[in-house]
Amino acid sequence: MTEAPLDDLRRAVYRPVRSGNALEDTTARIVQTVRLGLVAPGESLPAERELAALYGVSRDTVREAIRELADAGWLETRRGRYGGTFVVDPVPRPSEPAVVSPAELSDVVALRGVLEPGAAWAAAGRSLSADERDVLWARHEAAAVAGGEDYRRLDTLLHLTIAELAGIPSLVPLVADNRARVNAWLDTFPLLPRNIDHSTSQHAAIVSAILSGRPDAAHAAMRDHLAGSEALLRGFLA
């Protein structure tokens, strides 16, 4: 992989939308960039002209999507030399628990259990460059010291970096879409400090296995990590 980690993820998120539902798909794709942490609270989105080109829609469609999300409290537009469209800080959280059917929950969790351990296994089997290794470790360290609202964003970026380092470009949008659905549910219940500590230890095991080139250990560590996440999801949502 010659490009910096997360380039495949950006391409997966900033890709042309379906022409039949351009406004809805553009709105959903912008929300996804926020839920995945690609644009953090307080940061600006790409310019309207750039978004229109990336999504393959008109600037009017982009403006309408931005207007919808501004009305919903997700974005704000600033004028002037340093203006643009910014993600609000903090991002609004759902006021009520998510309503998720057992079938939908099982489907999303099962797919995650296939995608992410496989990504860790593939990443551990590659000869990572020095830059790739540095980025992976930096993502792990950032998540390890994060607190409050930053934790889930940085945790997500670590998982997405592992998917990118698998070296399978078509895997990245699958992991991104799956993780965006998971994050929408996670946002409906509180962060648990002891769970964060446990996750950090599990992240260390996953990252260490990848960096030391142990695919089976990386797969097993990710599988164990996701089992804890699944337990929380089922506990709060089922």
Image (spheres, rainbow, N blue to C red):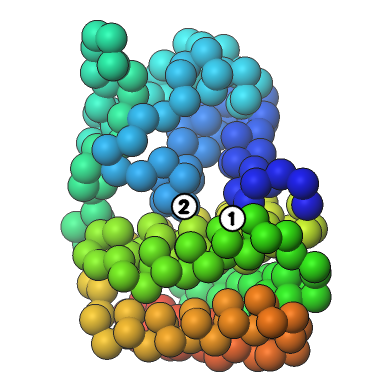
For numbered disc 1, what is the local secondary structure? helix
The residue pinned by badge 1 equals 176
For numbered disc 2, what is the local secondary structure? loop
> Is the residue marked by circle 1 packed among few (<14), some (14-19), or many (20+) residues within 10 Å?
many
Query: Which residue is at 80% across, 69% downward?
Result: 126
Q: Is residue 30 above or below residue 198?
A: above
Amino acid type of the residue tagged 1 in the rendering: Ala
The residue pinned by badge 2 equals 36
Query: Which residue is at 31% across, 70% downward?
Result: 145
Q: Are marks 2 and 1 in contact (CB under 8 Å)?
A: yes
Distance between mark 2 and mark 1 Cα atoms: 7 Å
If the image is split into quadrants, where does the C terminus sit?
A: bottom left
Q: How many numbered circles are shown?
A: 2
Amino acid type of the residue tagged 2 in the rendering: Leu
Residue 237 visible in this rendered orientation of the protein: yes
- Residue 181 lies, in percent from the top left, at 49, 59
Disc ID at residue 64? none
Q: Is residue 213 above or below residue 39?
A: below
Residue 223 visible in this rendered orientation of the protein: no
89 left or right, relative to 54: left
232 left or right, relative to 14: left
- Residue 80 lies, in percent from the top left, at 24, 9
- In the image, 226 versus 236, the foreground residue is 226
- In the image, 235 versus 92, the foreground residue is 92
- Residue 215 lies, in percent from the top left, at 75, 83
